[in-house]
Image (cartoon, rainbow, N blue to C red):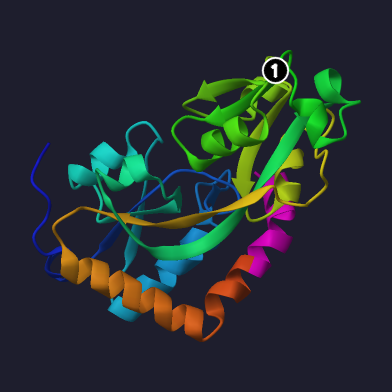
Amino acid sequence: MRPPAVDTLATIRKRGVLRVGVITVDPMVMRSANGEFSGYSIDLMRRMAQEMDVPVEFIETRALFMMQELLDSRFDLLATGLWMTTERAMIINFSEPAASEGVHLVASRARAGKRLQLADYNQPDVKIAVFSNTAQEKLARRLFPKAQVMRVDGNELLPVIQGAAHAALVPTLAPATLLTRAPDKLFLPQGEQALSHTPVALGLRKGDPDFLNFLNTWLRLRRGEGWLDERAAYWASQAPQALQGR
C-alpha cells in the first residue's frame, strides 16, 4: 500500500479538480443510460466542489476495490453511501455520518411469500443474504440466529431475485427503490418499517487530519441549515422514478 496523502486539500487546489470515488447504490449514486450521475451523494459532492471553487469528477469503482483505490490515490475521497464498520475504520478514516439509512428486510415472493412475520425468517431452512462484514451481517445473526446467513461481496438482492435466498437485509434511504429492481419477485414483509439504522459517511485516507476536519465542518454546516435532511427526503421520494429511467 502507498503511504497516505499528506495534504489532500492542497492536492485538490493544485490539481483544480475534486475527484470522488463512487459506486452505484440507489438512491445514493445512480447513473442514467447516457452516463450522467445523480443521487444524494452526488448532490453533496457537487455542492461541496462548488463551495471549494473547483469542478468535481466522479470516478466509478467497485465495492471490492474502492478502499484500495482510495489508498492508491485514484480519487480524493469516497462518497457513495459508505457504510461505517469497524473493519473498514482500521484501513481508512470516516467523516461524521452524512446520512442514516434504514436496514430493511426484502424477501422473495416465490420462496417467502407466506412469511409475513420476523419470526418466520428465524428458521433453520431460511437463507438470508447480507453484504459481508457489515452491520447488516451482525444484525442478521442477532435477529435471525437460527437462519442461514449467506455472505455476499456484491449485490445482496441478487440471490433473492435468483431464488437462492429467501430474503436479504439491505440499507437504503428509500425502501421503495428496492422493489423496482424486480417488483414481480420481491416484497417487503415489514412494509417500509426499518429493522435498524446504519450510518453512512465519506471515506478518506488516514494521516490527513486537515481534510477530515474540513469534511466534518462542511457536513456540520450543511446539517445545521437543514440541507442534508432536505436532500435525503427528496431522494427518498424521487428515487423510484429515477430508477425507472435507468
Range shown magenta: 233-246
Instruction: For residue 155, say whether it is visible.
Output: no
Where is residue 236 shown, x and y percent of the image? Answer: 68, 60
Kindly tell me whether residue 131 is visible in this rendering.
yes
Residue 34 coordinates in the image, percent (x, y): 54, 46
Q: Is residue 241 magenta?
A: yes
In reply to whether residue 63 is colored magenta, the answer given is no
Whether 111 is drawn above or below 27: the answer is above
Residue placed at 58% from the left, 43% from the top?
33
Residue corresponding to mark 1: 162
Q: Is residue 19 above or below residue 148?
A: below
Q: Residue 45 at what x, y percent from top left?
A: 41, 65
Along the line of sight, the residue nearer the viewer: 71 or 194:
194
Per the image, label 1 sits on a secondary structure element best described as loop
Image quarter (top left, top right, bottom left or bottom right) of the C terminus: top right
Q: Left or right: 108 with respect to 201?
A: right
Q: Quadrant of residue 108?
A: top right
